[in-house]
Image: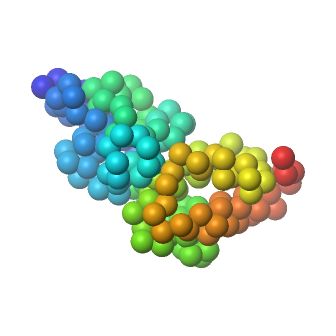
Amino acid sequence: MELVALNVNGRTYNIAVEKNWTLLYTLREVMDLTGTKCGCSTGDCGSCKVIIDGEAVNSCSVRAMDMGGKAIETIEGISPGHVSLHPIQQAFIDCGAVQCGFCTPGFIMSATVLLERGEKLSRDAIRKHMAGNLCRCTGYENIVNAVEKVMDENETRRGKTVR
């Protein structure tokens, strides 16, 4: 085992990991952060998405021991002050985008990265950005509606234009 300092949701954890442990395994099985889901273990479904240094990444595709010094954000850490829902989480509820809920954390993490860019995108551009996530319930329209809802709210506050 090797000791690695993981910065998860703004807090540093010193954790002993095996060389072959994925970040997904470490988050779920060692740190008990089970909001990140294990869907395919091959990086194809997006259920295990987390944000690493500002980018949405499939946590099943990276080794935990390589994550030292990187800022890792999980679904448990995206809400403001960890006491209320993030606007995209609320929009998923409001728009009926949660369906069975299994893919929801991965979609929310991808959407969070997109929303942090501060742009108002077309529905097609939203779909392209979210293409690395799969929904087994075919809830894509409601997911796009949720992302668009938050973009519209942000646009109202900031005055951005559609690209």
> Looking at the image, how many numbered discs can be counted on the residues?
0
Residue at image x 59%, y 50%?
Answer: 130
With 64 as the anchor, is 50 left or right in this view? right
Residue 12 seen in the current view: no
Q: Quadrant of residue 59?
A: top left
Q: Quadrant of residue 41?
A: top left
Residue 53 seen in the current view: yes
Q: Position of residue 71 (x, y in %)?
A: 44, 34
Residue at image x 66%, y 47%?
Answer: 128
Q: Quadrant of the N terminus?
A: top left
Image height check: is 41 above or below 81?
above
Image height check: is 69 above or below 145?
above
Image height check: is 92 above or below 30?
below
With 121 as the anchor, is 106 left or right in this view? left
With 3 as the anchor, is 90 left or right in this view? right
Spot the residue most to the left. 1
Q: Position of residue 35 (x, y in %)?
A: 35, 57
Q: Position of residue 39 (x, y in %)?
A: 35, 52
Q: Position of residue 26 (x, y in %)?
A: 24, 41
Of residues 67 and 122, the one drawn nearer to the viewer in this rendering: 122
Residue at image x 87%, y 51%?
Answer: 161
Of residues 125 and 11, the one drawn nearer to the viewer in this rendering: 125
Residue at image x 80%, y 57%?
Answer: 155
With 56 as the anchor, is 32 left or right in this view? left
Q: Quadrant of residue 67?
A: top left
Tell me, what colour scheme is on the image?
Answer: rainbow
